[in-house]
Image (cartoon, grey):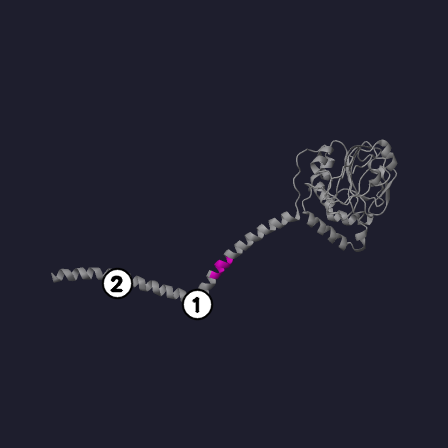
Amino acid sequence: MAVGTMTATKPAEPTGELNCEIDVDNKPPTKRDLDKVAQLSVLDENGKPHTFKSLYSSDTKEASRVLIIFIRHFFCGNCQEYLRSLSTSITPNAIQALPTPTKVIVIGCGQPDLIPMYIKETQCPYPIYADPSKKLYAQLGMIRTLSLGTKSPEYMQYSMPSAVIRAIYQSLKAGRGAFRGGDYWQVGGEFLFEDGQVSWCHRMKNTRDHAEIPETRRQLGLDGAKPPLRKTFSSSIRRSSSQLQRRFSDRRKSWSRSRDRTEKSSPEGSMMEKVKEVKQEEEASERSSKEDAKPNGAATATNGS
């Protein structure tokens, strides 16, 4: 299913196929397209509205280049994984070191009161806003689908079942907020604004199709090398397991030494030691007697002759 141009006024019809690849148009929106969405509102975590244009306008003195990342609902484990990896690989320090003033902004389709929870879960250092109306998603050509696609992205360092379980746990923990995370069908994308215009964009074809981190780094002018993997829960488990193995090995050695000392210090151990000593003395005495008997035998033989 192909997505039309940026002049679309409503979201594309959703597809429920879980492993299909959808043909999505990645043409940047035109100035005319941006004029249509400029005054649409996004909400900060306090529910305060801001015009979409105020986030990327070249009139602001903060930055002339803005990367705006549209995520899915606030409980999406795939998007959380993406932001964890992105926050580790594209740090605020790296952004500040770029020759062109740049900033990164995240927009989700859930309710703004869930933004603090989302920041806590992802450790995202960048501003996060909400577009619960999804008007920006629709006008900027982002589709609705539950398709997983056919390929697991590099930024996914948790397994798919693990991500799903984490999402369910978060939604249950949120209580009434579980139904305020946003449209589960809605997917997002990445839009790079330079001097008020979009120079590059990537629209998701499925629920785990954010632009890979190396590609995003290249678009920002960072080095094209593959960024280092972030620390994950599974790697911590492996390190802890290795440490436990070493500890148990040391503990077994300690127990063995302690057991030997205990056996020697116990009455039974002392008795065994004494038996060994007596046996050793008897064997020594027997060897000594045999050695003494040899000369005596030789002397007797001489006298007899």
Please provide the residue range marked out in magenta. Answer: 254-259
Q: Is residue 243 left or right of residue 42?
A: left
Q: Amino acid at mark 2?
A: Ser
Q: Residue 74 shows which numbered tag?
A: none
Residue 94 seen by the camera: yes
Whole-percent x, y for residue 290 in the image: 25, 61
Magenta stretch, main secondary structure class = helix
The one nearer the camera, 206 or 285, is 206
Q: Secondary structure at mark 1?
A: helix
Is 5 left or right of 302, judged from the image as shown?
A: right
Residue shown at 71% from the left, 45% from the top: 81
Give the image location of residue 161, x and y in percent.
Answer: 69, 49
| Residue at x 46% of width, y 61% of height | 260
Residue 169 colored in magenta in the image: no
Q: Is residue 258 magenta?
A: yes
Q: Residues within 10 Å of mark 1 (few under 14, many from 20)?
A: few
Residue 83 in the image: x percent, y percent? 73, 43
Toward the viewer: 102 or 33?
33
Quadrant where the C terminus is found in the figure: bottom left
Amino acid at pointer 1:
Glu
In the displayed structure, 263 sits above or below 197; it is below
Badge 2, how many Cα within 10 Å: few under 14, some, many 20+? few
Front residue of this view, candidates 299 and 216 = 216
- From the image, tell me which residue sits under label 2: 289
Towards the viewer: 177 or 236: 177
Is residue 123 visible from the viewing direction of this image? no
- Residue at image x 88%, y 36%? 36
Quadrant of the image for the N terminus?
top right
Q: Earlier in the sequence, mark 1 or mark 2?
A: 1
Q: Which residue is mark 1?
A: 268
Q: How many marks?
A: 2
